[in-house]
Amino acid sequence: MVRRGGHAVVLGASMGGLLAARVLADYYDRVTVIERDVLPDDPVNRRGVPQGRLIHACLARLTQVLDELFPGMRDDLVAQGATRWDDGDFAKLDWSFGGHSMVRSGRSAAAPQIVSPSRPLLECNVRQRVRAIPKVTFCENHDVIGLAATPDRRRVNGARVIDRSSDHEKTLSADLVIDATGRGSRTPVFLEQLGYRRPPEDEVKVQLAYASQQVRIPPGVINEHMIAHFPRAGRPRMFAMLGYENNFWMIAAGTMAGLEPPREYSEILSYAAELAPAVVTALRQAEPVGDVVHYRVPSNRWRRYDKMRRIPDGLLVLGDAVCSFNPIYGQGMTVAAIEAIVLRDSLRRGGRGLTRRFTGAAAKKVRVAWQTAVASDLSLPEVPGPRPLGIRISNACLEPVMTAAESDPVVAAQFMRVTAMIDPPARLLRPAMLLRVARAQHRRTGKRYVHEGSGGNVVTRESLGTPVRSA
């Protein structure tokens, strides 16, 4: 690897921060990760990751990036008990999107492989691998209180931090500073202190609120790997459950558009009875572990660093510090992982102009996830906000695809690959895929196709023995 500098500082030991540190270690002599928590050695929840106590899923693209940056990571997670869906058997998934229930039979070899560790197990594995890199040092129990800059303030050259136990303040000099401190990032404030404007923001308010409960269920009681019923128009409620290691499951129920979510386990069960009745009996026999945990997210928010006319060199921002999504789509960690790959590619091209190069390239990746999440949210009439023409067209085009995914495993697999961020949305527009979508639409509407045979006989689908499915 080509050396790009002596010292890089990463603010935050989030998933994005850890992956950024892994990449930076290939290009800098030293990498320091600043973290306000004291990081645990075991796979347990910590204060700085409140979502660790909530349901979460690893998108397939995240697993791919982890295996690329840390060879063997996927196998290690499976060996430690992480559950997986890797045979393409749709009988093991119970999903619905926008009122469309995905096919429950058949297989597809093209379906993405899903590995499902708990959030503490996942972060612990990544953290241990980063700790093992000789160039990386963790500076724990420290708060970031500002950025240091050159006299002309055109370049950030360090971070000001304070020890939480002693109140001792110091400045860490650096050739590059990366902010991965999450949605609560203070970089906009720090930029103002240096004489810059805050980045403009795009925001779509969703008023998400949900409750999660960890339970223990004996193996074999539930056949599905994952159950996920997303909100639809007229019903801004959701239910999901996912199996992790050691026979633990996380179940969640919630609402959007400001509706009150369930508070107690009994109320979560009522959501299950409505949205996933087949598992209610099993859930009534499950053993709750710990208390119900609640979480609220007001909006999707994208800080547009890519649109700033002036931004200092030597500073990069990634992960939720740039863009935080409605978490029900599971995009946050995956986007942070993709940004780590963008960082690696940007560093390969050189250190000069790194801030602009990375920020612009990362924004293109973020835009794909943003459009997916926002389009899904704005498909609900209960969510306020303007519906730009592009969003309306996107949702109109996606509707027949989701209809086809109700019955065609091949279409369902391709839809999953797009939502898992493996393939771009344009893959749904391939001629072979459009033909399958058209056939599914034809079956759904129950239309009869009619033509005259060579003998003048009228031929219909019924006369050919092809069943017609009612709408």
Image (cartoon, helix red, strand yellow):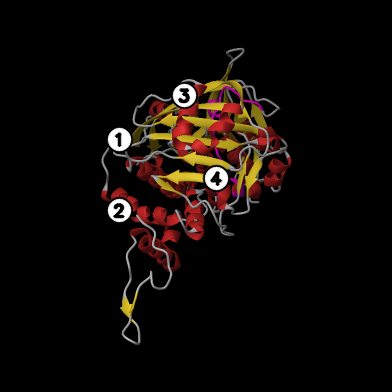
Sequence-earlier tag: 3 or 2: 3
Q: Is residue 392 left or right of residue 113?
A: left
How many marks overall? 4
Q: Residue 78: which disc?
A: none
User: In the image, residue 115 lies at what x, y percent?
Assistant: 62, 44
Element type where label 3 sits in the image: helix
Q: Residue 393: which disc?
A: 2
Sequence-earlier tag: 3 or 4: 4
**Residue placed most toward the observer, 262 or 218:** 218
Sequence-earlier tag: 4 or 2: 4
Whether tag 1 and tag 3 are in contact, CB under 8 A, the answer is no
The amino acid type of the residue labelled 4 equals Leu
Quadrant of the rendering where the C terminus is positioned:
bottom left
Q: Residue 382: which disc?
A: 1
Q: Quadrant of residue 349?
A: bottom right
User: In the image, residue 252 lies at what x, y percent?
Assistant: 50, 31
Please say whether residue 300 is one of the residues in the magenta stretch.
no
Whether tag 4 and tag 2 are in contact, CB under 8 A, the answer is no
User: In the image, residue 260 lies at what x, y percent?
Assistant: 38, 24
User: In the image, residue 334 lies at what x, y percent?
Assistant: 53, 43
Element type where label 4 sits in the image: loop
Which residue position is annotated with label 4?
59
The amino acid type of the residue labelled 2 equals Ile
Which residue position is annotated with label 3?
267
Element type where label 1 sits in the image: loop
Whether tag 1 and tag 2 are in contact, CB under 8 A, the answer is no
- Tell which tag, 4 or 1, sits nearer the viewer: 1
- Tell which tag, 1 or 2, sits nearer the viewer: 1
Q: Residues within 10 Å of mark 1 (few under 14, many from 20)?
A: some
Point out the stretch of residues depicted in magenta.
44-64
